[in-house]
Amino acid sequence: MADSTSTTCPLLPRHKPLVPRPILLLAAALVAIRLGSTDLAAIEPWPGEAWNTASNLTSLGPGGGWWNSDLSGAYWNPATRRLWLANNSGVFTMLKENGAGGFTNARNYFVSGVSTQRDLEGITQASNTNLVYLLHERMNVIREYTVSSGATNQSWNLSSLVGLMPDPNDGTEGIAFIPDSWLAASGFRDGNGDLYPQSAYGANGLGGIMLVGVQHFTNALTTTGYVYAVDLHTNGTWKTVGRYKTASRGDSCDLSFDPSTGRLHILHNSVNSQPQTNTLEITDLTSTACGSDRQFTTLYEFKMPGTFSQNLEGFAVTPALTSSNTVGDKWCFITDDVGDDGALRWFRQLPYPVSCNAGNYQSAAPSTQVAVPPSVLVRDAFHTPLTNLAVTFSVTCGGGSVAGGTATSGPSGIATVGSWTLGTTPGSNTLAANGAGLSGGPVVFTAFVTDPAKTNTLVIAGPAYGRCSPGYGILTNHAWTVIQAAVTNSPVSAQGTQFVCTAASVTGNSFTQASPTNVMMALTSNATMTWRWATNCWVAALTNGEGTVSGACAWVSLGSNVTLQAFTSSYSYFAGWSGDVSGPGTGDVSYAVTMDRARTLVANFADQRTSNGTPWRWLAQHYPDTTDYDAAESSDSDGDRMMAREEYRAGTDPTNALSLLKMTAARCTTNLFIISWSSVTGHTYTLHGSTNLTGNWPAAALTSGVPADISGVTTVENASTSGTPAFIRVSIE
């Protein structure tokens, strides 16, 4: 190894059958239209700056264009404040801060050997900062290097665990170290579901375990990109701790552990046939049983910055909190394997928001504490609660005082003031809360000092079907009393009609509409509040035949116009709307209906058929390569002398010469004839008799309505015609 240093659903065509024929519509099925978001909608937006506005550190790579492509894993060491990066062409790099608010290249480490030995993907460190661990993807090997000398010390081959994969882009991809302290604190469980609080090797281990993310697509939409947990012995042996499923939006291409919060960040790479799915999954290392594996608890998911064409492979996050429990750097680093718009980006604007948790908008008598002490929630950019963070509460208006003005956030990230005592003058008081390094602050709490010498009334009104708190009637309170009113039963539904509370109107007093069903006000004068409701109607669509409907199964505003759309299958045509229709146009696939009441419509579909009545679907099932159904129904591909359309009527297989309507046995006695033929369950048959074959068959049947026997052969005994030899014909009804 050498080293160097460097610086700075279209609608289908509508068809009609060539010969009109009645269609029996046998069933009606309610078409359920899924309303709401798709699975991908659960992914939250990227919280930081855009890709092209983040600092581009690509120029700090080794000379010779090493970072023009193939930059992969990333790791930030908070103790040494070094950024480590792996390139799958065979070099890994250490960056350090330059003292001027940026970074410089501290050292490049070049790995010798063939390409499979130089395929570096993941990089991390454990408790010893003079050792760095590289993940070699195609070999599925973890290799330990000495930082000071660049020498190779030990390696662990995981091929027996993850398996060798034929695609050179598949294999072990991301790596992160979890110390014993967090294994215990998180309640980490192994593959059997047992607690695994520390490395099994003690002084001969690393003081924790390694998590290894795997990239392996089984097809365009699924992945076996598991995360494996392994416990490494310093002698090169290892043991499997468990295999863990993730959100499975793509392969698990990098892992970044925040030792200040215990959260694992899993970078999932894009799947080309889906919408942009470079995502970041957050887990707290807890897991549940999932078949023979464990499933990590997914707390949140975020869409990564950049575009769909980018191949994001590395992610390193700085700790949310420092060792002194102050807000950290609020940075992360992301690598792009393609590198067309920067291979390494430094994101420095991750927001750590402070927000109201409880205790806003209250009232109390003069010089009295509010009932609910105000509290705030502090979190990092990825919604991780920040613990032991100092938050300061201070009175900003109206007098009064606080006790415990400097509060520390608890495990859930909530910091609560000790108490807030309001001032002596009726009116508004405010309290501000903020913490160093937090965004969105200060959070301002408002409370009101009531006036015991003055009373005001509030009249609350609304329709009879509404329920609210406080209820309908007249409220009398001291002036400046806070009223928090809410409707408690919206929506109300009955027999196709729905009532939904939309807002409140208030006269005589200012108010805040927190939501359609919630109102807040400090009552300063006599006032009237009326809850407003809207009426909706249910529109439903049934289908008769083979097709679907969109725009139905939903609540819509009374009096609105709703357009329903009918979609045929490949073997049906639209036959019109029926049911509770309104107005003309019932023969059109797109139909507008006025919702003056609840309505249920029926979209009718009929089978596409040939001129002789043979369904296209039946012909397509037996002749999947044909597009000429008229020719197909007149063919005899199995050579049994029955055309396909005849076999359709008979219920036989037109591609099987042994499947046909034929006599299987016949004999006559003096007074009886006994006849058997092949038959198909569900069909009935008619028998005619004749003394010759030169004339027409008699109109009168010997017998009719004969059901097929379940054995596949039907036998009939009947009286012969005066002993004269008879010809018998079996026909399908």
Image: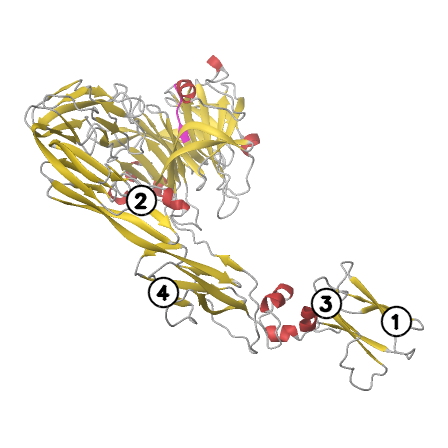
Which residue lies under the disc numbered 2? 490
Whichever of callouts 2 and 1 sits on the residue coming sooner in the sequence is 2
Looking at the rendered structure, the secondary structure element under dot 3 is: strand
The image quadrant of residue 528 is top left
Disc number placed over residue 673 in the picture, else none: 1
Residue at x 48% of width, y 28% of height:
142
Q: Please say whether residue 20 is visible from this viewpoint.
A: yes
- Name the kind of residue labelled 4 in the image: Val
**Mark 2 closeness class: few <14, some 14–19, many ≥20 residues within 10 Å:** some
Residue at x-position 49% and y-position 61%: 543
Quickly name the residue at label 3: 684
Which image quarter holds the N terminus? top left
Q: Earlier in the sequence, mark 3 or mark 4?
A: 4
Residue 617 image position (x, y, % from top left): 59, 66
**Which region is colored magenta?**
123-127
Q: Which residue is mark 4?
A: 593
Which sits earlier in the primary sequence, circle 1 or circle 4?
4
